[in-house]
Each structure stands twice: as C-alpha cells, then as structure tokens.
Image: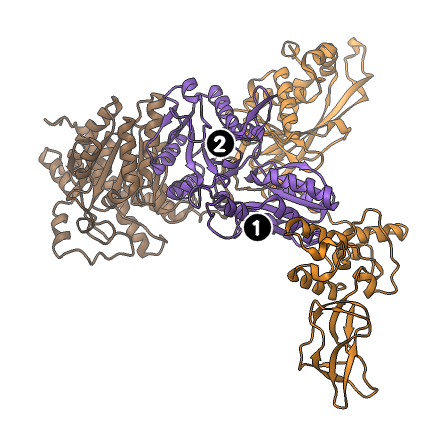
Amino acid sequence: MAELSYREAVAAGIAQEMARDERVVMLGEDIAGAGGVFKTTVGLLDRFGPRRVRDTPISEQAIIGAAMGAAMTGLVPIAEIMFSDFFAVCWDMIANEIAKARYMSAGQMALPLVIRTANGAGSRFGAQHSQSVENWAMAVPGLKVVAPATPADVKGLMAAAVRDPDPVIFFEHKGLFATKGEVPDGEHVDRLGTAKVLRQGRDVTLVALAAMVPRALEAAERLDRDHRISATVVDVRSLVPLDTQTILAEVTRTGRLYTVEENPRLCGWGAEIASIVAEERFYDLDGPIIRITTPHVPLPAADALEDHAVPSVARIVDTVVRTAG
Amino acid sequence: MDVLMPQLGETVREGTVSAWRKQVGDPVNHDEPLLEIETDKVTVEVPATAAGVLVEILVPVGERVEVGTRLAVIRVAGEAMAAATSPGARIVTLSSARPTVPAMPAAIADASPPDPARSSGRITMPAIPTAIASRAASRAASSELRLSPVVKRLLAEHRIDDPSLIPGTGAEGRITRDDVLAYVAARGGAVPAADRVVPMSRIRQLTAEHMVRSVATSPHVLQAVEVDFLAVDRLRAAAGDAWRAREGFSLSYLPFVARAVCLAIPEFPHVNASVRGDSLVVHQRVHLGIAVDLDRQGLVVPVIKDAGGKTVRALAVEIRRLADRARRGQLTPDDLTEGTYTLSNSGPFGTLITAPIIHQPQVAILSTDGVRKRPVVVERSAADGGDSIEIRPVGVLAQCFDHRAFDGAYSAAFLARVRAILEQANFDAELT
Amino acid sequence: MTSSDGIDGATRFALYRSLLEIRVVEKRAYDLFLHNLVKGTSHLALGQEAVAAGFAVAMRADDYTFCTYRGHHHTLARGAPMVGVLGELMGRKCGLMAGKGGSMHLTSVRHGVMGSYAIVGAHLPVAVGAAWSAQYRGSGQVAVCFFGDGTTNIGAFHEALNLAVVWKLPVVFVCENNLYMEYTPIASVTAVEHPAADRASAYGLPRVIVDGNDADAVFRLARDSLAAARAGGGPALIEAKTYRHSGHSRADPAKYRPPGELEDWLRRDPVAMYRARLIEAGISEAALRDIEASTQGAVEAATEAAKASPPAPVDVVEQDVWSDGGSAWRN
C-alpha cells in the first residue's frame, strides 16, 4: 500500500491503463505540457509521449466529438473537460451523440470512452466553476456515471471505467484533490456499479457521494458520540449502474434513509434512490426518507456562502437528530 | 395530551369556541383557564386538565364543534406522549432505546447559537423552534394514526390489533420498529407464523423471465443416456494429487463431459446452432456456456469461447476461472455472450436426472448429473468369459433440445457419440 | 471508354448506377409517405445524388462516411442494402437499425457509414475523431464528413476544422450547399457568399468549390482529396453547389422558392445530365435501359421485402443501450 493524494491517484489510474493498452489515448485542454489545471495528469506526457497525450484548443465540442469518433473506430480515449460546468457547452456531444449512438444503431457502434471532469464545490470559484452536475449525467440514458471519494477508489474506478466497453462519465471532486489515502500496490481494478458500506449502524442509513462521503462519515461519528444514534454510511460511488441492492439492504436493516447530496435539490441523484426505496422497501421504513442537499440555487462564490449552501457535517447531524426519533 | 370538548350539560351536544385564553407555546398549569365555549345555554371556561405547554390549537374561535371533539393539545412536560394518551399501557423500558426527549434539545444546541433558556439545563417546549414543535405536536396529536410503514407491517405480521398496547419510545411517543419488536419479544415470542413475502432479486427476476421465455419459445424434448465413467475415473485417479497440487483444485467430471461434447459437435453441427426466424444458424465455432449457480439466488451462464479446440485441462481451468468470477460477481459482459451450447451441472448434489431449460437462442442444453457406483452388466462373448456384473461409476447425461431445430434421432445419435467418447476417454495427453 | 479525364468505363457505370439507385429509392420513399407507410419525418436528397455517388465511388471500402439527417443518399451510395434503408424508414424489423434510429440516423458500420447525425454540426468533431484514430492506428483510412450549408454557421464546424488542421488529420469535409438552411436562403443569414469555401482561409485551407450536380467533377475532386488526406496531407474543405428538388422535409412544400428556380435546377438534374453524358460518350441507349430496369427491379424487390417484414419488435426497446445488449441501470 502506498499513500497517494486523490489527484495523484487520477494519474496513477490513467497510467496503469495506458501502460496496459496501446489503444488508450488522452485529450483535453492543458492536460499534456501543463499536467492539468488541477495537476491530475502530471507525468503522463513524459511517460507516454505527445502521440498519446494530446493538448487541445479550447473546443469542448471538438474534444468530446473527437473522443467519440476515436472510440467508434477502435481507440479507447480519455477526454478531459476541465470543469464539469463546461459540460453545458458540449452537452450535445455527451447527451445526444455519445449516449445514443449504440442504441440508435441497434448495437452497431461501441463507444468505449471515458470523460473525466472536475466537479463540485470547495474552491470558491462561484456558480460557473463549482457546480455538482452528476445528476445531469445520471438523467441521460446511455451514460455510466462514477464519482469516487477516495484515492483508492479513484484509481480502481478509473481502471474500471477505461476497461468498460461503454461511455463513462468520471467525476473527480475538486474539494478532494488534496486528500490522501492508501492505494493498493500493483494493478488495481475496481468494479463499476458497486456501492460500499463504509460503516454499519443500526438506527439510520446515510447514503452519500464524492465529497459528501467524508462528511457523512464524520456526521456518523458525532451522531454516535453525542446523540447515541448509530448510523450506517454507504458510499454510492457509481450512480449508473446503481448498486440498489446494497442500498436497499442497508435501509432494510435500519428502516431510515438519508441521502447526502451536493447537487442542487430538484431531481438530485438522491431523489431516484428515495423513489426506489419508497417503491421497494416501503414496508421496512420506520420514518420518512429525508434528502439533505444543496438548496435549489446557483452556487455562490464567497466561502461563507458556499459553506452554508453545501451540506455540512453540522447540517447532516442536525437533520438526523431532528428527524430520526 | 388532548383537550376535548366537554359535555357541558346532559342535553348539550355542541358548542362554539368563543375565545382562547392561551396561545400556542404558552405554559399552562393544571386547572388554569384555557378557553371559553359558548353553548345555546351558557358560556363556560374550560380549564387545562394537565400542566404543560399548549402546543397546538385545533379549533379556531367561532367554530362550532360536537362534544368529544379534540380542541387542543397540551404537551405534558417530561412525559412520553404515548404513555399520556394510553393510560392503560404497560410502560416497558428498553435498554436499547434512546431517551428521545433529552436528545432533541441537545441536538439543536449543537447547530444553533447558545440560548440562555437552554443553558440552564431546564428542558421546556418553548426552547424548541416553532416549526419543529408544531410538527412534533401534530404527530403526537394523532400518534395512533401515524404509524410508520414498517410498524404497520409488523403489527399485521404479528397480529397485533391494538397498537396502543405498545409503548412508543420514538419522538413524541411514536411507536418505532424496535418498540414493536421489543413488545413481541416481551410477549414471549409467540409469533403467529405468517407467510413470508420475499422480493425477488434482480438476478432472480432475470432468470425467471428467461426461463418463461425459453419454455414458451422452444418445444423442449428430453433425452438421456447412461454413461459408464470408468475410463474417466481412471484418468482422474491417475492425475490425482499432482493435478490438485499443480492447478489448485480437483479434477471433476465436468471438463471431460465438456470435451466430449466439443468433440461430438463437428459430427452433429445442428446441436450447436440458433433458431433465427425460419432459419437455423449453424455456428462454426463452439462457445460453451456453463450454468453457474449464484448462491442459489439465480443463474448466470458464462461462456468458454472457442471451446472446440481446447484440451480437457484447458476446459477445466477455464470452467474454474469462470465459476470463480461468476461467484465473485466479476464477470464482464463479454463472458456472458455468444454461447452456442450450454452445460448445466447438478452432479455435485448427486441428482439422478435433470431436464434443463434451453439457454436461448441456443437449441440444446446438456445436464450432467451425479455419478454413482452401480452394478452394471458387462457383456462379453462366451470366449471372453461371458457376461458379468461389475461395479462401475455411472451417471446420466440428459439433453433437452429444441424440436424445431432437429428431431429425436439426431439428438440420440449425438448423445450416443458423447457417451462413446467418454467411455473410451482417450484424453491421456490432455491433462498436462 | 476511358476518357481523357481518367475516369474509366466501369467507374462511370458505377457512378450512374449509384445515381439511379439513390434517385429511385428516394422517389420510392416519397411514395411510401403518401401511402402512410413511412411515419415521422424524412429529408430527401432528390437532386443531391451526385455528391454522394461521386464520393462513395472514389472511397476505399474501409473509409468512413459521416452524414446528416439528410443521409439516405450517402448510406445507399456506400452500399447499404436498399431493403435495410426502406425498412428503417418504415419502422420494420428488417431496417438497418431495426427501427431504433429511423430516417435521420441511418447507420451501417459494415459499409463504413458511421452514423447520420440529426443535430446540425455534431458529426464534424466526430469525423475528426475517426480521422485521429485512423492516423493513430496508421490505417490509411480517411473520414469523409458531409453536411449542409446551414452547418457552416454553427460552432462545432469551426471547432472541428481547426482541430483537424492543427492535428493534420485525414478528413475531408464536404458541404452540400443546396441554397437553403431549412426554409431560409443561406445567403440571407451568412456573412460570406460561399458559406464553406469562403471560411476555408480561416483554417489555412484552399478555397474549393465544385459543381455538386456533376458526378464526374465530384468524383475527380473526391479522388484527389482522398489521396492527399491518405498521404498525410491533412484535411480538405469542399463546397459542392447543388439543389434540393423537394422541400426541407416531408412537411415542407418549399413555397419559399422563387418562381423558376426549381425549373432552372431541374434542367441541371444530376441524373439526367449524367445519362446524357454517357450517351455522348457512346454508351448505347439499350445498355442504359438495362441498368435502369435492373435498378428499378431492385427497388421494387426491396420495397416488397420491406413491406413483408414485420414491424420492429418491441423487445428491442430495452436492448443495446449498453454493450452487454441490455439497458439495466441498476442491480
């Protein structure tokens, strides 16, 4: 086991796959010479050369379109969109073209590609550089959606995403880039579509994603210590495919579900989970399902405002204590 | 505790609320005037029947109500609501239960600015923000109706008709799941047996769907042959410990059956085919599916690609690998596609014969069942000593085939060929 | 019959056959609308046959075609079966995509038709990606991307051209300028006279305009630009002047066209012009009648086969979202 930062794990996961498979290529803005604006691709140009690690112009449609064309003709591209907010300028490519090509062609086309992007708050960049848009991606049939919370998951899920024969949107969280964790040595490949139970409790289940995972864990500690409420914490990790069995099993055990979501309220990913639980485990619920989300507002820039908007440990604890009786 | 419209006289059936002396949130003392009611005869003051806090007014001034109507709710300090509303109930203290009332203000203190009213340690309702208080009150006011889904289910399962018998330990005395379970346990566990409804897992649903579709699609015909595994057993014994040491698992009958099937298919190519519309697509390559049980939750059928040219050893290793991956949930979509013929193995459980269901769109599937030692009449000419009864390892191979694709004679000849290959077992060179 | 311009007899027959097939199938598609056997929308390429035929005949079998929602002609020209095209328009099981794509998304990967794209401009970057892949793999393949004049005013056009030039990719961009974006004359909404050619200089490319109704001219230009791209010379941008004989889509009677315009262009009908040229080159009337009769026969047979095919089976609705053939998004 080696300790890596979340950002180092991005490059480690990509490097593992590029070394394994000559078809894997990268493209994006500032990813090669500069090593990425978040330093997530440092060293890849030196190791794999400019033929496989390519800087592009600021042309998000061309980046994603080129990844699509390359994927349908035998390569396995990893495209970077610098901030997930920029998905809006290439959403046609992602949502209309990539997501639908296999379906519309009745299986004639394969699109093994990964779109990486920096998602989420914590950097005080304001409403156009701090959004959590994982629920946009989740809403489009034909996209797989992953959002890891730890360096080990970054590396393992990156490998799984590259090896997956379908398009995968890979959300890296800006607020987690500096965090560190143990990453298995040697080849490390995880599985898409699997949630992880990080902590088991008997009273409530907290379901979280990406930067909300460490907050949910800390909230669980405080609930236990200060309020004698014993909480399960599930890291969803993969929104599509969604590991509903793990979530349903935990909710069945505790009878209570809280989702902790960074995306704005309406149609956030937790809404789908809430709906599934309500449909399939209604008679195991011992209280209402409660969603803890960013309010339905564009994200403000100032630190105090951003911190207030995104679910905090205190808000999670408070919400659970108020409602879990 | 509910404040009800009193019977103000023998002939009085209703009255009008004319004034509230207290407002929501006000503390009230026992017997302190709470509201005024006008009837067609008199105006009377109605006193509080308990000390506490007025948490909810249910009838506004001017409204006419019948005797017995709930007018207001008084939160009785320091007392769980269920106990207050169910005076006859036995109070059971659960060691695992959380003391709900103290927990609530403490939690709020966690997230809100310090409040002198609370820092004294005195716990009173006004300390709780209004929204929470009114929600709690409305919940308490109708606690008998506000049972959570799981509580309702448990009440039904345990045939408990009167939930008021169960002390609630949840917020405002709500009956929680644990309360019901504790009540049932305290009752002596005499739980009337109820049928369990087990939702099907996703894989179970998919398996079910496929099976129904396959039976509806293909007219299944079962044919079976008995096979003498003596020669195979000799090879297994000879490979023995060396095999296990080298490969890490023991050598079963299945790879031999798989090999025999692969060797027989070129002579009977139509068993390795799919029905497409009005045509039979005869596959050039043999991709052999192996049905794997997933902890009895469902089936998956990983596929050995190009099994036709593989040795017994290669098949054994491949079967082992796919079964491991299947059970660990690590199969890739590639592992599950392109099968052209399938083996289903119930042998380890010692079954006699299994009629398997065809894995669509294939046209045949073979079940290998238990191999047991049996007395067998071995026929020899008189010159060779005549017939004798010998102990032989015998097992049944049962094939279901799609009668659309071919007929019984074809299937029978194929099975006879598989049997002959297994009984000769010329695989000595294939085990290393 | 090799002429001085280097187009041999077999090529000329191939061009004429392709022109005819497109013409007859597109007319048949229109008839099938009238019989209510084709639902939804369809964008016919009547009048634009020569662009498709000229390029397809010049392309290598493994080259890539990318086209727009007006893509029947390119799909047919690459050799996709008529029954698959007509079946797809009619929503039949025998359709190229079993009814899942429809008229605007004809795709036949085994014929190099890498999709028809119904969002204007979307496929230019995709063609760039296919060309990048060909360059990376050293396969010698070229991607050819067809689009309308309206596309030249959308951002993806410019992003794709820039990247293709910067990376020197084997891709040929072909603008079929049929004078109308949808209902509006392209000239009235575009800053330059020639919407594609006049933009070429912005990307350091030569200004190339071709008569898109002349199959020979298109073929020659296609042959040369494909060869240059294959040899590593980078992309080309070609503007082919042509004309839509029908409206934008089946819903459009094209009343916005000035009187006489259609008649002028019908005098330059690419199929009739090519027939006259073959006669002039000494091909017998009988030989041409043979090829016409056999094309007509093929279209009749394809029509009957498509009509006889059952409707697209509903099972496919939940198939092929993912590479495992299914659409499961949860366990």
Mark seen at residue A165? 2
The colour scheme used here is by chain
Foreground residue among C322 and B85: B85
Q: Earlier in the sequence, mark 2 or mark 1?
A: 2
Residue at the right extreme, as displayed: B188
Q: In the figure, what tint was chain A given?
A: purple
Q: Amino acid at mark 2?
A: Pro
Same-chain check, marks 2 and 1: yes
Point 69% across, 37% down: residue = A199
Between residues A126 and C14, which one lies in front from this camera angle? A126
Res. A271 mark: 1
Along the horizontal axis of the image, is C270 left or right of A176? Answer: left
**Which mark, residue A128?**
none
Quarter of the figure that contains the C terminus of chain C: top right
**Identity of the amino acid at label 1?**
Ala
Query: In this picture, is A309 found above or below A149?
Result: below
Q: Does residue B211 appear anywhere in the picture?
A: no
Q: Which chain is brown?
A: C
Hey, which quadrant is residue C4 in on the image?
top left
Q: Is residue A277 left or right of residue B3?
A: left
Examine the rendered structure and indicate whether residue A318 appears above or below residue B242.
Answer: below
CA gap, disc 2 to disc 1? 28 Å
